[in-house]
Image (cartoon, helix red, strand yellow):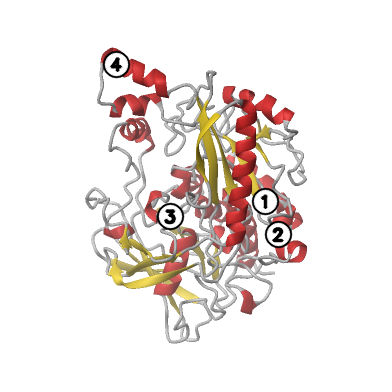
Amino acid sequence: MAEGAAAERPTVDTDDRDRTPLSDADVCVVGAGPAGGLIAHRLAEAGHSVVVLEAGPQFDPTDRRQQMENFLRPAGGNIWEMGGPRDAYTSTGARHYPLNATRVKGIGGSTLHWQGMVMRLHERDFRMQSEHGVGVDWPIDYADLRPYYAEAERAFGVAGADDNPYAPPREEPFPMTAFPPSHSDSLFADACESLEIDMHSVPNARNSESYDGRSACVGFGTCKPICPSGAKYTAESHVEKAISAGARVLDRVPVQRLEHDDAGEQIEAAVYATPEGEEHRQTADQFVLACGGVENVRLLLLSESPQYPDGLANSSGHLGRHFMDHLFAGAGGSLDRETRQNHIGFNTSETHQFYDDAEPVVGMKLEFLNYAGPSPVTSALSAETWGDELLDDLRSEYGQRIAMGALVEQLPDADNRITLDDSTTDDHGNPVPSIEWSIDDRTRAGLERANEIQTRILEELGVDVDWVAGPDATGPAAHHMGTTRMSSEPASGVVDADCRSWDLRNLWVAGSSVFPTGGAMNPTLTIAALSCRLAERLDATLRPD
């Protein structure tokens, strides 16, 4: 079933920007999201010649207030211009996967519309096979990544508190103080205390005070999909820093394929298209793919050659396989007290108390939602009533809704995969990505367990529970993981522990596609930590002894 073509993007005119290749580039980075932005900045700051190729546009930050207003209006939700032939895909698995509802192409990538929660993976997440006999072990452990987690928190600007008894060990305080518990969090507190369930703060990549030239959060409440104030981190800031350090960044230049040398041992060029329909070859000494868990795979598959007939860097056969996401579990209803729903657009409290449970052996984190039920603004704008009647309707549906959410781990499965669909092509005539995705019994058990705990808390609070999102009504969290996974040996994955291709010595892969397992934590902080580590390794490679 072809997807992604129904929501047409606005026609984009060409412009007069110079999109010719950078000569004598040390590094070519494909993708300008959080991974690409951090890596480009680190390497440019270290004195290397860096070029970044981004498929999407550079959005104007001064338009954010208008984008928010457009989002709040009926039928005004496509503020990041996703859809149409450029973003076409197919979904052929047991479960439909709504890819275009959850991604952005443009400078800043997914951080343009993310919610901004940034947790570290737990120690058990790196050794699931050793400890629980499921999934696989990472070729690195938490201790290896621990200093880079701290570096990533400083880079993003994370507001948090050391109040989570279940979190892995830290080495220093968060850069900013945590956001205080919301009004609805305070409602949950008594029920959780009665049930002996611990609540703790949520680390957020948004400013609780001025940080890194960005203002403190002013409470627009539209964090997902847009922060008009700039308090929430986006990768645009590191792309800008990379440019200031000398990097060349090209927007609207989708890479069509990678070309390797005659021996098939290293990449020679990234071939990209311009808005004018021209093709250019960007050469470099080193190449970094940082365009997401789907597009990383697609580009490698599009770059097949006689030496790599099943896709570039795919001698192991693992390219595109083990596609994982996090699954949503939730429950909610009405309460006979004021809840101030949607007063805050992000989570301020959660619990990891059940994360490391051995039955079922999947991670889960439970969230206390601050945005349950409809927003009064969106309800009013889409209403068919007026005046006093509209006011009565808003009062009846707003202010007493409350809910919980959860992310539940999905373990790697070789049959969940990204391939190419030759029957459907994009705006450049290339096959589109095809997603085969299903949910296994272990994940279903995790969803059921999350629902059981959520319902128990809500009923203890006195909530009239009127909806539950469980195994048969779940959806993905848009965390695309596992498709180019790292491994300790070439036969077991696509990249090594440093995120370098096993097959091509100058090809590196960044982002959550390298995760061997996904845990149940939002992945962006781990993406950033791995990116800082990759940049360090790549810098050393460019400076031989």
Q: Is residue 484 left or right of residue 349?
A: left
Answer few, some or many: residues within 10 Å of disc 3's Cα (few below 14, many 20 plus, some between 14 and 19): many
Q: Name the kind of residue labelled 2 in the image.
A: Phe
Which badge, 3 or 4, comes first in the chain's sequence?
3
Separation of residues labelled 2 and 4 (CA atoms): 56 Å
Look at the numbered discs 2 and 3 and tell me whether their residues touch, using CB distance below 8 Å: no
- Residue linked to disc 2: 126
Note whether 3 is above or below 496 in the view shown: above
The quarter of the picture where the N terminus appears is bottom left
Give the label, 3 or 4, closer to the camera.
Answer: 4
Residue 507 position in % (x across, y down): 53, 70
Q: Name the kind of residue labelled 1 in the image.
A: Leu
Residue 534 position in % (x across, y down): 61, 60
Helix, strand or loop under label 1: loop
- Residue linked to disc 1: 121
Which badge, 1 or 4, comes first in the chain's sequence?
1
Look at the numbered discs 2 and 1 and tell me whether their residues touch, using CB distance below 8 Å: yes
